[in-house]
Amino acid sequence: MKYYYQLQCKRLYRSFKDFGTEPIIGFPIIIGLFYWLSLSFFNQVPYASYVYVLLSTVFIYAFNTSGHNEFIKQHFSTSNFRKIKLLNSLIGVMPFVVFSLYKACYIEVFLIFVLALLTSWGRKRNKVSLIIPTPFNKQPWEFIIGFRKTFWLFFLIYALVIVAIVKGNFNLGLFSIVAIFFICSTYYLKKDPEFYIWIYAMNSKEFLKYKVVTALWYSFILTIPICISLSLFYADQIHVILLFLILGWVYLIMYVFMKYAFQSQGLEIMQGVIGVLCILFPPLMVITLPYFYNKALNNLDLLLK
Amino acid sequence: MISIKSLQKYYGSHHVLKDINLTFNPGEIHGVVGENGAGKTTLFRSISGIENFNGTVEYTKGNIKNVMGFLPTDPDFLSKVTGKEYLQLLCNARNIKVNNFAEKNIFDLPLQQYAERYSTGMKKKLAFTGILLQDNDIFILDEPFNGVDIYSNTVITEILAKLKQLNKIIVLSSHIFSTLYETCDYLHYLKKGSIVKSVDKTQFESIEKEMQASGIKVKIDNLNLK
C-alpha cells in the first residue's frame, strides 16, 4: 500500500512535468486557483456550502474510475482494497474539507466525510453503451464524441431560450448562444492520437480548413434553432444575434487551431485559460488566431508530410 | 517499390533502430520478426512516417503516406464512436465514399456498438477492415493475427493472399511462425534494432531456430519459479 501511494505521488509529479512546469511552482498555483474558485463560488452561489458538499462528492466520483478500481481489486487483498478506496476518497475531498473549515461550515464538513465514505463503498458501473443518435454522422469526430457526452446540456440551453422568449429576456437568449459555443469549444480540448491525423491524405493547410469547415457547419446546426427563435421574437436585434454568432465562430476556430497548436503538449488547462480570457476580451483573438494557426501548421507538418 | 536506406532511430541517447536497409516490391509479403522490444513497431511507425528518423524511405509512386494502411499492434479508438463511424472516419480521411458498410463488414462486427467496448480481437478486425476500405497500395500490419480468433485468422490469411495477387506491398510482424510460413515470401529478423538476417521462404526455419536458441532455458531458470 505504501508503494501504491509513492507511485501516485510519482504520477502526480510526472503530470506536472508533462504540463511543462515544476511541481514546486505548479502545486501552489493549483492551490491558489482552487482557493480563488471556491471563494468566488461561495460569494456568488446561493446555498454554496451545501452545493460545495455535492461538488466534493462529484469530484471524487469522477476520479473513481471503474478501470482503476478493478486494477486495485485484482492486485490487493480485500481489506487493503477497501482501505485504499476509503483513503483515496478522503484524500480527494480534503481540499473541500479544508476550505469548508475555513468558512466555519462544520456540519458540511461532516456531510462531506459521510458522502466520501458512502462513495468509497459504492461500486461505479462501467460506461453505458447506449448509442445516442446525433446529426454529425458524416464527419464522426469531435462533435459526435462531444455531443454524446454533453447532449443533456442542450436540453437545458434550449429550455433557457424558451424562458428568454417567454420572459422577454433577450440577454438570456444571447447567453444561450455563448453557452453553445462554449460547450462546442470543449470538444476541441482533447489531443488527437497521432494516428487519427496521420491517416488523412491532406496537407496541413487542407486539414485545418477541413476541420474549421466541419466545426462551423456543425456548430451552426446546434445554434440555428436558437438564432431563428430569437430572430422571430426580437426582430430588431438580429444584428446583435448575428454578431454573437460570428464571434462564436471565431472563438470556435481559435479552439480548432489551439487543439493542434498544443498537439504535442496536450495542455488542456492552458487552452481553458486562454479561452476564458478571449471570452472576457474578444479582441484578444486578433493576436491568438494567427499565432495558433501558425503553431498548428508547424505541428501538423510533422505528421501530414 | 519501397526502398529503406540507412534508417536510424534514436529515443534520446537510446539507439532503437540501427542502419536498416530493406526493399519491398509490389506483390510481395514481408515478415519482420524479433523479440519484444527489438524495434519492430518503431520500424513500422518510421516507415509510415508517424515517427521521425534519420535515413530515407522512398516510394516510387509518390507520397507513401497517402496510399498506406497502417494497422497498429493495439489500435486506439476514440471514445463514443461506433464501429461504423470509425470506418466512416477512415474513409473520409482518404475521400472514399462507401454507401453500405454492412456489406463490407467481412468479420461480422457489431458496427452499431461503440468501438472502444469491442474485445481485443474485434478491435483488431475493425482496424483491419478500416484500412482495407481505404483502397491502399501498401499495408503495414503490426501483429495482425494477435488476439484474433481462428476463423478470423483464416480470413486474414485469405485477404493477404488476395492483396498479394492485387500487387500490393505488404509488411507484417507476427510472433506466430505458422502464420508467417503461411503468408510471407520473405522474413527479416530484427534483433536489438538491427536486421541480422533476411531470408526467403526456403530458409524461414533457420530464423525460427535461431530465435528459439536465444537462451530461453537460462532465462526461465533465472525466474526461480517455486
Image (cartoon, rainbow, N blue to C red):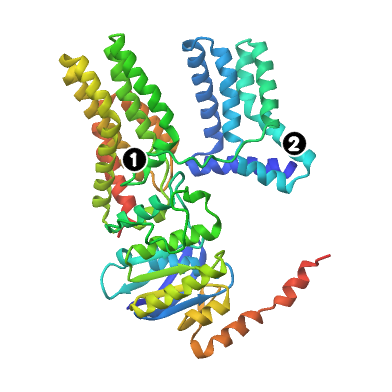
The residue carrying mark 2 is: A82
Q: Amino acid at mark 2?
A: Arg
Q: Is residue A96 above or below residue A254?
A: above
- Asked if residue A284 shows in the view, the reply is no
Q: Earlier in the sequence, mark 2 or mark 1?
A: 2
- Mark drawn on residue B204: none
Give the tally of numbered discs: 2
Q: Is residue B224 above or below residue A152?
A: below
Q: Is residue B84 above or below residue B13?
A: above
Q: Nearer the viewer, residue A30 or A172?
A: A172
Q: Picture coordinates of residue B140 (x, y %)?
A: 42, 69
Judge left or right: residue B38 versus residue B218.
left
| Residue A211, image quadrant | top left
| Residue B6, image quadrant | bottom left
- Mark drawn on residue A258: 1
Circle 2 packing at 10 Å, graded few (<14), some (14-19), many (20+), is some
Kindly identify which chain the residue marked by label 2 belongs to. A
Question: From the image, which quarter does the C terminus of chain B lie in?
Answer: bottom right
Instruction: Tell me the SS state at disc 2.
Output: helix
Q: Nearer the viewer, residue A252 or B39?
A: A252
